[in-house]
Image (cartoon, coloured by chain):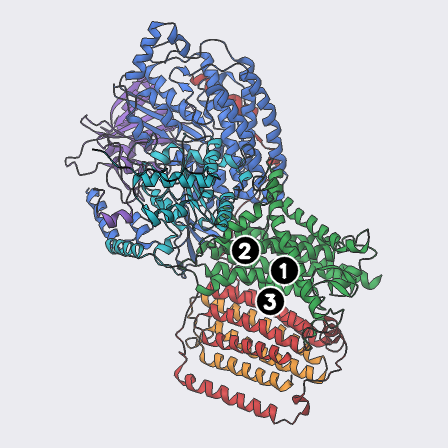
Chain colours: A red, B blue, C purple, D orange, E cyan, F green
Amino acid sequence: MEEIAFFFGALFALGGAIAVVAVKNPFYSVLALVVHLVFLAGLFLLLMAQFLAAALIVVYAGAVMVLYVFVAAYVGGIEEPKWDASPELRVIGPILAVALFIAISIAVLGSGLAALGTPGPEDVPSGFGTPEAVGLLMMEDFLIAFEAASLLLLIAAVAAIVLAGRRREDRKSATDDRKSATDDRKKLVKADEEINAAAAGKGEGAR
Amino acid sequence: MARMEDTLHDRELRQAGTLRDEEITVADFTAELSDRVPGVEFELEPEQEMLTVNMGPHHPATHGVLRLVVDLEGEVVKDLKPVIGYVHTGIEKSCETMQYWKVIPFVERMDYLSYFFNMQAYVGAVETLVDLEVPRRAQWLRVLHMELNRIHSHLVWLGTTALDLGAMGVYFYCFRDRDRVLDTFEMSTGQRMHTRYFQIGGVAEDIPAGFEQKVRELIVQLNTGISQYESLLDKNEIFLIRTKDVGVVSRERLLQLGVTGPLLRAAGDPWDLRKEGGYLAYPELEFDVPVGTVGDGYDRYRVRLTEMRESLRIIEQILDGLPEGPWIADDRKYALPPRAELSTSMESLIHHFKLVTEGFRVEPGEVYNPVESPRGELGCFVMADGSSKPARVHFREPSFINLQALADMTIGEYVADLIQTLAMLDPILGGIDR
Amino acid sequence: MPDAPGLELILAEINRENPGAVLDTSYDREQAALIIDPAKLIEVLTWLRDTPGQEYTFLSSVHGADYFPKAPRFAVHYELLNRERYERLRIKAIVANPEDPEELPVVPSVVELFPTADFQEREVYDFFGIVFEGHPDLRRILMPEDYVGWPQRRDFPVGGEPVIFTRDEVTNPGWWQ
Amino acid sequence: MNIEWFIVLSALLFTVGLIGVLVRRNPVVILLCLELMLNAGALALLAFSRMLGNGDGQVFVLIVLVVAACEVVVGLGLIVAMYRRRLPLDVDEMKELKG
Amino acid sequence: MEIERQKLRVHAPLEQPKSPEELRARQLKARDMLRGDLTGEDLDNYVEERVATTTLEKVLNSARAHSIFPATFGLACCAIEMMSTVSPRYDIARFGAEAFRASPRQADLLILSGRVSIKMAPVVRRIYDQMLEPKWAISMGACSSSGGMFQNYAVVQGADKFMPIDVHVPGCPPRPEALIYGFTKLQQMIMGNADPGWRSRYNAHGTEEWARGGPASKPSEEALEAYAKAREVLGA
Amino acid sequence: MDLVPGLPLADTNFVDATWILIVKSIVIFLVILMIVPILLLVERKLLGRFQQRYGPNRVGPYGLIQPLADVGKLISKQGFRPKGAVPILYELAPALTIFSAILTLAILPFGDVKDGVGFYGIDVPIGILYFFAFSSIAFYGLLLGGWASGSKYSFLGAMRAAAQLISYEIAMGLALLGVVIMAGSLSLVDIVKAQGDIWFIVPQFVGFLIFMVGGFAETNRPPFDLPEADAELVAGYGTEYGGMRFGSFMFAEYIEILIVSGIASTMFLGGWMGPGPGWLDPIWMLFKMWMLAMFFIWIRATLPRFRYDQLMSFGWKILLPLATLNVLVTAVLVVVL
């Protein structure tokens, strides 16, 4: 059962990843990455990381990929021809990558870590991978990392605003150059008696 | 100037697919047969980040078949061009083929929400042409119906505007009250819309017994109705932020653009032909002209709502002081005799026959007769050439003129505000296209 | 309304500055009108708008007229309004018939003076085929862009305009002609 | 289900991401491929965490998520800024950092 | 000269019809036999087609009849009265038709409310073509039914010149009651599965995409040919 | 017994037998499936009453069969895809929307564990995060629908929907955080159990308000119905959809209303708790959901629509700081008291 779940998830996660690289239109790449993420979250579940699976979906699929969607739609579907890398990279790139893969595989499989060949210990601490456990770890053992991460997020947010925000002068907001209404018109809006009288008088005169 | 050849040449080019302008022509329609929503044609111009959206002619918020070619940058309107003519009916041409008294039903169908005003503009012009004095009772009856019509028109405006803003309930309440107003029309004229009640020289028929009672009831109902709208909209924060400070154009610019009616009054100009021109019974009646201070959507809404109340005031005065007397002029040369006379008076029968078969002739001349319609100055220009048919009938439609201000009101606003401003403009496409 | 003598005064004043601008006056059914030479249209309207004491600042309506059997056939009417005194004044620019019937009569555009004339001049062009020189965007406004003919001329037939559909085009090309 | 499998999958995903970064020229897609590589790393971390029965790896993954989010925000900000300035959206043609 | 006519009751006296459907079937049969258009098996098939609808079809037709979403589409004066039918007093919602849909894709009924000008007619036809089958059209008021009083250069003299109309509602403008009456007539028509045979005349089966060989379905040969020719003629 | 031995989905709390899980899922699905048409009908009828008219009353007694007629009609409409649409994605979008909406139903608890059966689909330890995860997937349904239609109105509608969803999801999450802090658990069952003394709507009233406002925005209901504002964008992301695909979007919208109502009544209104014997629990839960759904309809009949920028600034400048403040105050109070 577990094996089926893994291969199913792995197949789609890998398929999604390949599609990200292979399709021409960036918009489709984004969608492929969403598929990849959903199945990756399934794999996370297999590793008993429930909180991270949910976080992956909420943060990645729910927020980060939305940004990608916006940008891909904004920039427009600029399609590039398939496999049109710079000539030197067209050959070297894949070779490098495959070499890296082989290196990693050798490193992992040849590492002699006996535990690698097992599904992991059965007696994980209770609540392993729940929000509670992760939260405790975060707040007790890794507080500095947590704070650093929050600082990083803040800096990134500021940077994004600086980068993508429009310069002030060419921004013409719809509400900018309007004067706010005064309060006295809250009661509208009847003409002064004089204006009316004058108008009436004129009307009679003309008749 | 060989414009004719030019047009022909353009047409050939367009059919050959080599000439394109932003108009979607018949040829374009059929040639492209695009699968999009009606009339939607887009192109993204990356240089300007502009999106050209084509609203209409079939679009729920254009109050008919108006087409707006809107350039959007994000959600902000950068340019706007109204394209009109989708209900062009050729009424002015048709009027030229009809005798003077047969034209009345045609003019009613121009601005189909203010038919009494259209009639008054036309009938008044013809009366000036033939120098006919309208009896006092007829004048008062005309004012009564016109003011009821003003309320009716504003009710439809309020309902559709509220619908455009998403407030469904108000739409239904407005139409409930509108039906009540139409009941009174039905009682006095026999029709809900397009009543053909005004005749040259007076009105078609005296009001029936019980009419006054009915209108008095209506006044009470409308007063509560208007209070209901106020409590539904005026205390609604969303409505207020949607309408306040939106679509402001200065009073001077509005005057340059020829805008009249509630739009001008909302900008603070108490210009009302009922006061200025003083036609019919208006000089004898007491009413105020509501004006706004800022000229935004909220002021337009307030001005119209207050106008409805003022109209109710006028109606009440009319009911109190309706003079007795004939309701149609005595001059049988121009005015149809009352129906009852036909069975007793031979002369009336002859007049009736003559009027109905060949109409009456009018000495050559030209007259421009303006009235204050719910949307502004509604002027009727009638040109007589001595025959029994008018040589030209032209209407100065307030909706048509006011529409020119739309671009000024909306450029730089959000697309949602465009909808709101358009609704506040209250264009009636039948009036615009005629 | 300016009455008949008042009109004469206006005529005299305008003609002093622009000789021959105003051809005639008419005072009929309590409605005052100036009949003018279209070549001097801008000058007359500017004078009426800007001269103290006149101040016809509001242009109510612009419409065309076709006096068909008569000799100067077309006219463009401008309904001016003085909002202070509530006085209306009609300016009639009578356009002489062009020699060639295919040619279109020409009148200067007043959009610069009165922006409200924009749509109305387009409408007059659409229906009467009167060209307004200097109009920023003179296209048909109510009729379809590729329509041929000037419908409200008095010699244009009233009825019977077929609709052009692709489908009919296939079975019977040019069936509407 | 042995941990090796996860590690191999992680390596595969990383390789795919790397190929993408090397051969694609659209900056949006390159960012996406970076995401792929980060995710591959996250998967490996989780696998090791499971192998050790220790939650520390999960905290690392969370930090990776944060880093990824930051990277996205800045990267996309750069792309939008480039687009606004009508620069070509092609990494091969971007040779200078001047705006 | 004597004309021989086949008598209906030659061999055996007919039984009394058991149901209205049967009666109707006999009437149709009798009419066509008298006319002599059809004979034998064809006749049986014809009658079966006309009269016998399956239960499922009946249910579906009933569903269609009672859940009509009109398009938000107003043209002129009649549009105001059309809006009135939704209003509290007339309340077309009772028939399940208050859900006015702005997008033609979701609408089942096009109410042509007002005069159709020559500038608007192609647009109207296009909206009709964009609606999905099954779809219907009501022509409301004199103008769209026949041109009405506007017999001039600008108005199409009757909307059936360019699209199939199922129900005509007279009046200028018709009262909301009249429109609702026309609407209920349309409902009856839908439940009776009556196809007046107009669709084929106006080449109005399916949507525009369908006619042009869109992705979702196959176009008819004729439609394909016709549109190809049209494109050729227009040089597009 | 676990459904999938390796899947630690429900290992912390009570776990049912597989066949019970299957029966439960079918029952929950069917119940909601029955409720949605009733909700549709009730909305039309109720709107009618708000607007001084009757609403549908001709099909069946009191118009009760009206939704069936609607469904029958929608199903029998022509199958269709616009020519400019993207082939598979266009069909996928409505399915995705329905799929994510239905999956979220699984975590709504209709009662405690009784006789060895939990009255809920599953009780996941990540609890409320599950809801947010699937609502972020629902976003792709709308986005694909708008984008794949190949029409500009759809596109604008989809973009509005996207911006709206992500803006309000944050405020919603923060609003629920206060409850989570008070209950000390993410599991919905635990949260309901924690409301034995007092429903969280009393201490967390601000959170409740924010959550409901966010819920209106999540479900695209008025006054936040900008993505399908028919006055501006014809029908928003659904412009090019007809027949049952359009029906699916509508169906999903109503399921989402029920879900938001369900989550709100679980988190704030004491879930299944109420007076009376234990077997009344699911009834109470459904009753609370129903009342909140009625609230959705009431608002629809009353309020006008926001403008796009107002919607955005309301979400970011008012709701978000308010929700943050709410969380902070709750956290401080929970620690201090």
Which amino acid type is shown beneath numbered disc 1?
Glu
Residue shown at 56%/23% (left/top)?
B312
CB within 8 Å, label 2 to label 3 = no
- Circle nearer the viewer, 1 or 3: 1
Q: Quadrant of residue A58?
A: bottom right
Look at the image and tell me whether residue A38 can be seen.
Answer: yes
Q: Mark 1 to mark 3: distance in Å?
A: 18 Å
Mark 2: give few (<14), some (14-19) or many (20+) Cα within 10 Å: many
Horizontal and vertical percent position of residue B48: 41, 59
Residue B131 vertical position relative to residue C101 in the rendered view, above or below:
above
Disc 3: which chain?
A: A
Q: Is residue B297 left or right of residue F192?
A: left
Horizontal and vertical percent position of residue A94: 46, 85
Q: Secondary structure at mark 2?
A: helix
Residue shown at 47%/13% (left/top)?
B137
The residue identified by callout 3 is A157
Q: Which mark is residue F249?
A: 2
Horizontal and vertical percent position of residue B259: 43, 34
Which amino acid type is shown beneath numbered disc 2?
Phe
Q: Which mark is residue F169?
A: 1
